[in-house]
Every structure is written in C-alpha cells, then in structure tokens.
Image (cartoon, coloured by chain):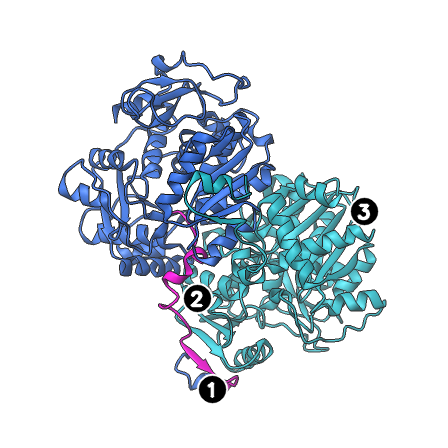
Chain colours: A cyan, B blue
C-alpha cells in the first residue's frame, strides 16, 4: 500500500530524476516521470516495459504532478482527456485520432436504491462508452503510449470487451491491429471484433494459451504494443479516470462506499489510486471511504482469500457466466485485499443465479442492460447490504463496466414474452397481460 | 412546407391562443401552445391526439418561443434537456426520472472522408445513447407527455430499437410498460426488451398487424400512451434535438450538407425543422444547406418517387436487411420529398450488399460499429459522392442512428478470423498474418 501511495504522490522525490528512454519526443508522457516497481520501488525510464528488472514486480507509472485545479479540469473536453494532466499522455492528446471515451453518466439510482434499501445510490454507467465497456478508457491510454513508442502494431489477447476496444481504436487511429482470441469463442464476439480489423487471429486453446502466445510475440517482435502486456503500465492508468469522474460528478467529493468488480483487480486498485491522487492534489476533501470488490463465486480467488483472512491467493480454474471477470490468477489480487481491508470494505462473491438476478435488478429498476460483470457487481451490492457489510445510510456508488448485448446468452432463457396472442383486441384483453 | 415553417415559427400568432386540455398542470408542455395540422393548419389543444379532426392530416406541436440564447443552452445539462425551451416538456424536466439521452458525440471522420473523397466529414454518432439508438430521444419526449397526461401505461408496437427504448425508459420512470412485437422476432431482440419489462407481448402477425392492434388498443383503453401512435406529435419532436446538437457541436453553425436515413421520414423532417427554428431564433446564421435522404433499395418508396419526379409515394412490401428502415408506407415520405427537393438535396437508395459494405466502411475507418440503418446511410453517402449528387468540398454530416450489436446477423458471414492457428510463435509466423 505505501508504495502505491508513494508512486502516485506529487512530491515523490525518488522518481523525479527518471528520464524518458531514447527516441521519445519531449512531453510524450505528460507529467509521468518513469516506471516504478510496486514491490521494491526500483525505477526505470518510461518505455514499453512491464516487469521490474530487479524483482519482477509490476511496474507502475510515476508522476511529478504540477498544481491542477478543478477549473482547469472542468474547462477540458467531455471525455477522459479532461484529466490529461494526471495521465501518461502528451498535452496535445486531444489532437490525436482516438475514441474519445469516458465522462459517462453517473446516474442517481433511486429505484434500485429503494429496492435494495440503500438511501443514496449512484450507478457509474460505463456501458455507454464508444465500444460499450470501460475498456475504451484503458485502451485509449495504451494507444497513446503505442503511438509515442512508434509502435507499428497495436495488439491484445482477449475474449471480448478488450478485443472490441483495441480493434476499434486501432481502426480510428489508422494503426494496424492484430487481435488474438480463443478459436472456440462465440461467433457474435468474433464478429464484434472482426468488423474493425482484418487481422483477427483465432488460437486453438483457452485464454491462458492465447495470453502466453501474446507474451511470446511481444518478446520476439519489434514494435508490437500489446496493450495488456508490454504497455500494461500505461494501459492500466486509464482506469483512474473512473475514479476522477465519480468524484467530479458527485460535485468534487468522494463517495462513502464504492463497489467495483474484480477480474485482474487492476480497476479497483486504480480507482483507489485516483481517489488518493485527488486528495493529494487538494481537489477533494480527505475523508474515509470504503472500497468493496465483487466477484462471481465460480471465479472468486480474491474473495476466498479475503474471507480466509489471508494474503495467499490460490489460483482457480474459472467456471462462471461472468466471463469478463474470469481471471483465475489475478495479478493485482493482493493489492485488492490490501485496499479493501485498509479502507474497511470487503470482497464478496455471488452465484451465477445471483449474477442473472443482478442483471434483471438493474434493468427493471433503472433501464440499464448490463453484462454479466455488471450483474455480478449489482448482485454483490445486494449481498453486501443483506449481510450488513455495507452501510445503507452512506453514499454509495456502484460501477457498471459493460453492456448486456454482449452477454445475451446469460439471461436469454430467463426473460421473454408474457403472452403470445393473435392480432386482435379480444385476444389481448383475454391474454391476462391487461 | 409553409405549414411546417409556420408551425415552428416563434411568432406564429394563430396558435398562441390554443390552451392545454383539462387536467394538465400549468407549463406541462413548456412553450408549446397547441397541436396544428400539418396539412390544413387546423389547431387543437395539447392532448394525446395525433390526427386532425378536420382533415385527418398529422398533428404537429406548435410553439410560442421566447428569446433563447446560446449561453442559456450551453449552461444546460449534457443531454437533450439543454434544449428544453424548444421541446414540449416542462421546465422541471430534469427532475424527472428519465434516461437523459442525447448530446452524443459529433466525430470528425477524417479517415472515412479521405476514403470517400470528402474534404470535411462528421459522423453524428447516436449509437452511444442509453439504449444505443436515437430512439431514446423521441421516447424521452413521449415519456414526458405520458407523465403529464397521467397515463397509466407506456406502450409501443415495435420490431427493435423502439421497444428497447420504451421498455428501458418506463423501467427507470417507474411507469408500467407494455411492448408489442411480432412473435417471429429474433430471440436476441426479444431478450433486449424483455429484460426491462414483464409485459412484452408477442403478436402472431407481421409488424403491420402489430401496429394495427396498437391503434385499436389506443382507441379502446383509457390512459394508454402509445409513443408512436397517440402521443406521436410529442414523440416526434425529440428528433429535433439531433439537429440542434449538430449545429451547436459545429460551433453554432449549420452544415452545408446532411445525410439522414429515411424510415417513416420523421427524423429527416424534424432535423430540418430544428435547423429552421435555430435560424428563426437567431441562434445560427441563415444559410443554404442540402438535405439528403437514405433508403435501402428493398424498401425505397421515397427514393423511387424522388427519382420519378413525382409526389406519389407508392407503398411497398419491404425486403431488406435494414429492418429498422423497413416502413413500406412512410407517413412523412411526402415531406421528405419536399425538403430534399427544396434544399437541393436528393433521396438515394442502395442494395443490401452496399449496406453491408457501408457497415464495414464505418467500422474499419472510424471504429464505429453501426447497425444496418447506419450502413445504409454511409453507403448512400458514398453513392451520392460517386454519382456527383453530393459536393465533396462542402462540410458534410452523416447521422449514425444505432449500433451494430443489434443487427449482427447482417454481417456475421462477411467477417471473421484471418487465420486459425496453434498456440505457438512458429504457428503464428507461418500463418501469413504477420
């Protein structure tokens, strides 16, 4: 935890000396000063690196932030670039061809709050991003890094949302994309990526096989930017914008409680990092807030460790309909445990039936059709209230990371017509619907 | 045409005397003063009416606009309610529970422009609305009317986007919805509505049968607001916001040319009406602009009439993959012809293969995955340039009305993996993708 806070602190002196690597233009990464290891603190110059050369810990972007005011941010564009001073991107990022994601709506969810017994509830709805998931945020930051590194190929291994976001962003930027997927992926998910790129590569194997192949290619080929492999430190910073937006949209204040889905755990740690940065910069008042992580029981290694009171996260073989959360060996799981414990939150998990019920809860009460990951988060929110882990009188935000059309199969057997009738008024009045 | 302009004029004196019907609160419809027949000009009080009692012509909302400034609008929310002074909604509309649609991005489409040979091209991307189509705009206005009329049921006949928008908006507003669809509708489209409502009614018949049943129910049942039947005048006004936003996002100026898909024709006529209102109110400079309509050849009654130089639109039986444009007897077709002819535009149509190509053009060049209606509009844009009907040196806007996940089948046979390989670097380098 202390390393996280140090790395994001405006004043962290030990990283201010790091200089960009060769061939990079001045200001290519804005106020970022280097990459710092989250485990040992070792620093390296900004570059397409992701593992500490000393201890193999994860590298994270470090900054020397200038003074930043609310007014400066509010005068910016209605997308994530309004926070460009806090991201590893150049000052002219708005002139680049990118997807302009973010500044999605923070919806007051009074109906759902009433249903769950929560006094003040908001849904941060990232399903309205350009490719309909929060992945557009992280991919936009990865794209900026890829462009600054003069990468010739923009790539990823993925099973869904990330593939869509990478293929679309590459198309708009005019950079070649190569997207790797398991060959048994459902046809609709293949189409939703192949529509953007002519280099969709199907790999005979599961996601872990695809991921290993991507790491191998990243090591062998020059000039490939794999968003979630070798430019991962830049990519991951994009999730901070979820935290910035929530605070700004609440009127420049932090929520009392926030519920966030956990796959690799990166999003949760980055939202927390964003809140800490806002406090450090004086943009919000310092106050306690509780962070909660949401998993599906079929892939709940972090929740299991949380409940066991241990730091040892045992990898699992995922078996859940929440496929976008199905990472059996979550890289940032340990940091999720730290944050949830230190802030007085929790990590909880729910069954696939509760995931489906969560999807319907949000749709029926707020008119938002979420994917299984969102169903997981809503379902966990309900469970946290029901079990007394979440205080229903405190201001609570829940993040919806994606949209339901991408995971239709999960609930297509659950809902349907109330009646099938002949086309006459008499048939209708006799149908029981009236 | 003259009636359209009169009805939208701030000073139209003959409608200022119309008063709201019984039981309506003061200011329930903002600056709207009554409903005026588009054909004969006859006026009736504001109410759930859609046909002129004198001549059966379509009723349209008439206003007495106050002075409205750019600054007032810019200080409003980032959704369609920033234009509330120009819509039939109350001044406190932002306090109601609604989907808060609109203010979608206007994206500079330099890649696509270069591909098509157009110097300055923008895409108005309505696929990022809450339920991923422009229908959220019209439904939000219909919902406001339904609430003001104390309707107990919010309903529609639909085959897709409208059903989604109505069911979702009703869920969020806490008003009962009943949505009628043809019983042979694809399962995914049923799910995408049923997720929001427990009163999805499947009707054995085609869309015309469903539509007739809806009209019958609207006539028999008290307190039902069918968005596209008895509250249609209010509903249709929502499309004006597309025109307002385009002008504002261009820096308070009108484009030189705009290409709009034509189903009933309502959207095209309302965008034109919006431009005329902005000129009347002094919010933009008066200048010529050309309006183009886009249809799929398999349902192109307006395009056929345009090319034949006649006003007689012969109804057709639709046969095209662009199902959201498949209205064989378009209610506003005659007004589309008027507007396109008077402004120096045109109505054009393309084959289903060209629709598919249009979807890929937008995806591959701008990272936007559109539905078949959007593929139609992009494909028609290309044809208009290729045939010299659209001037490629003028500022051109094209409207994307919806998103591709809803019409996946249309292109699922067109795109897919470039290669299927074993999970090894050697297999990848030998695949031909590199």
Classify residue A298 as left or right of residue A414.
Answer: right
Q: CA distance from mark 3 to mark 2?
A: 43 Å
Q: Secondary structure at mark 3?
A: loop
Query: Where residue A375 sits: x, y (%)?
Result: 64, 56
Q: Residue at x 77, y 46 (%)?
A: A256
A364 over B252 or under it: above or below: below
Q: Is residue A369 magenta?
A: no
Callouts 1 and 2 in the same chain: no
Q: Residue at x 37, y 24 (%)?
A: B282
Q: Residue at x 75, y 56 (%)?
A: A292
Q: Secondary structure at mark 2?
A: helix
Q: Is residue B418 magenta?
A: yes
Residue A391 is marked as 3
Disc 2: CA contacts within 10 A as few (<14), some (14-19) or many (>=20):
many
Residue at the far right: name it. Answer: A309
**Chain letter, disc 1 residue:** B
Query: Where residue B98 sits: x, y (%)?
Result: 56, 37
Residue range corresponding to the magenta coloring:
B400-426
**Snapshot quadrant of residue A213:** bottom right
List the residue tagged with mark 1. B427
Q: Is residue B25 visible?
A: yes
**Chain letter, disc 2 residue:** A
**Chain letter, disc 3 residue:** A
Q: CA distance from mark 1 to mark 3?
A: 54 Å
B192 over A24 or under it: above or below: above
């Amino acid at each position: 935890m202390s390393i996280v806070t140090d790395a994001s602190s405006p004043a962290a002196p030990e990283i201010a000396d790091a200089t960009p690597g060769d061939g990079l233009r001045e200001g290519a990464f804005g106020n970022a000063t280097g990459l710092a290891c989250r485990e040992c603190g070792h620093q390296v110059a900004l570059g397409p690196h992701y593992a500490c050369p000393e201890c193999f810990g994860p590298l994270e972007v470090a900054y020397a932030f200038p003074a930043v005011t609310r007014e400066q941010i509010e005068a910016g564009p209605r997308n994530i670039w309004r926070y460009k001073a806090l991201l590893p991107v150049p000052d002219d990022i708005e002139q680049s061809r990118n997807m302009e994601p973010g500044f999605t709506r923070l919806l007051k969810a009074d109906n759902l709050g009433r249903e769950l017994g929560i006094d003040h509830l908001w849904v941060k709805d990232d399903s309205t991003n350009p490719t309909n998931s929060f992945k557009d945020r992280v991919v936009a930051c990865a794209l900026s890094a890829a462009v600054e590194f003069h990468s010739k190929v923009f790539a990823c291994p993925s099973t869904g949302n990330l593939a869509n976001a990478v293929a679309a962003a590459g198309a708009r930027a005019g950079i070649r994309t190569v997207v790797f997927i398991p060959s048994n992926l459902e046809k609709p998910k293949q189409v939703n990526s192949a529509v953007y790129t002519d280099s969709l590569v199907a790999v005979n194997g599961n996601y872990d096989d695809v991921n290993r192949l991507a790491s191998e290619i990243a090591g062998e080929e020059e000039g490939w930017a794999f968003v979630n492999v070798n430019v991962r430190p830049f990519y991951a910073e994009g999730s901070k914008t979820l935290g910035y937006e929530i605070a700004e949209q609440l009127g420049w204040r932090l929520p009392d409680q926030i519920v966030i889905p956990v796959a690799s755990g990166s999003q949760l740690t980055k939202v927390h990092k964003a809140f800490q940065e806002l406090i450090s910069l004086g943009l919000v008042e310092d106050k306690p807030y509780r962070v909660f992580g949401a998993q599906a029981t079929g892939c709940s290694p972090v929740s299991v460790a949380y409940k066991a009171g241990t730091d040892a996260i045992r990898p699992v073989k995922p078996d859940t309909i929440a496929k976008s959360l199905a990472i059996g060996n979550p890289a940032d799981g340990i940091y999720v445990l730290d944050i949830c414990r230190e802030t007085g939150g929790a990590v909880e998990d729910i069954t696939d039936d509760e995931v489906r019920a969560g999807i319907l809860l949000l749709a029926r009460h707020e008119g938002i059709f979420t994917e299984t990951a969102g169903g997981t988060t809503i379902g966990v929110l309900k469970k946290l209230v029901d079990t007394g882990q979440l205080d229903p009188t405190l201001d609570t935000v829940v993040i919806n990371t994606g949209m339901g059309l991408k995971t239709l199969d999960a609930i297509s057997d659950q809902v349907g017509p109330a009646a099938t009738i002949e086309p006459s008024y008499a048939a209708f009045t006799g149908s029981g619907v009236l």
